[in-house]
Amino acid sequence: MYNNIETILTLAGMLSKTLGKFMQITVSDTQKYIFVENVIETEAIVGKAINDNERYFLEDDDIRKLPYVANYKSLSHSMNKLRSSTFFFKDKKGNIEYLLSITANVDEFLYVRDILDVFTNGSPARLPNTPKKTAAAIDKIPKLNLSIHDIIDSVLSEGQKRYDTTVKRMTKSEKQSLIRELHSRGAFLIKGAVTEVASKLNYSEATIYRYLQKLEEN
């Protein structure tokens, strides 16, 4: 047999254990599922018919020629947003014999992202309908009086070790990586940070602000 189904199932099992419960792993032939773990789509059941996406792959002439389809979007029957990738195991004539699919519930990851966002940036200190004047006052609440010098010096020191050079000799991209790191640590939330970083990197404050704006946009 061209494709050893036992090897495919072993691979699927490894992926299931490696990627964990947030990633559904399925293996099917051209008709039905023969392996399902970490169930996300409740209709994916061993012995049951494959879903519409997989059936479409088998019927579409152009897709059948591909080795796999990656990161395609779909909806589960419960209307959860899904993102999947499917690998095609083909016989000697190039016909699809088995399909191995990895599916993630995007809504779960968005939920985790929101939790991390609240944890790292804090919950909004005001209600949605807070008057603008009150909101502005809340936004001006002083941040913790951390030592910005210590934070900046720590990041610069790490950068010098990583790039094996001094700050003065760093390239533009290396300096930008330091700004990204400081931004990720919340350093620029502290008063005086932009001025201090600009001085240390021999940049203008305007340059720092422009790069921070790009980071926010991305």
Image: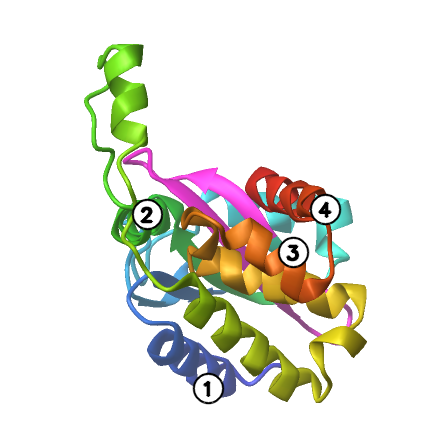
- Neighbour tally class for label 4: few under 14, some 14-19, many 20 plus, Cα within 10 Å: few
Check if mark 3's residue and mark 2's residue have beta carbons within 8 Å.
no
Coordinates of residue 90 in the picture (x, y in percent)? 67, 70
Q: Quadrant of residue 2?
A: bottom right
Please tell me which of labels 4 and 1 falls first in the chain. Answer: 1
What secondary structure is the magenta-colored segment mainly? Answer: strand
Q: Residue at x 64, y 83 (%)?
A: 160
Q: Amino acid at mark 2?
A: Asn
Pointer 1 residue: 6
Q: Nearer the viewer, mark 1 or mark 3?
A: 3
Residue, x 73% and y 86% (percent of image)?
Answer: 165
Q: How many angstroms separate mark 3 from mark 2 (CA)?
A: 24 Å
At 47% from the left and 58% from the top, the residue drawn is 184
Q: Amino acid at mark 1?
A: Glu
The magenta region covers 71-95
* Disc assigned to residue 170: none
SS for dot 3: helix
Q: Is residue 82 magenta?
A: yes
Q: CA distance from mark 3 to mark 4?
A: 8 Å
Residue 42 drawn above or below residue 173: above
Gap between marks 1 and 2 measured at Cα = 48 Å
**Is residue 131 something that shows in the picture?**
yes
- Badge 3 density bin: few <14, some 14–19, many ≥20, Cα 10 Å: some
Q: Is residue 131 above or below residue 23?
A: above
Task: Check contact, mark 3 vs mark 4: CB within 8 A.
Answer: yes
Q: Which residue was labeled with disc 4? A: 207
Check disc 4 and report its element: helix, strand or loop.
helix
For mark 3, what is the residue? 198
**Residue tagged by mark 2?**
121
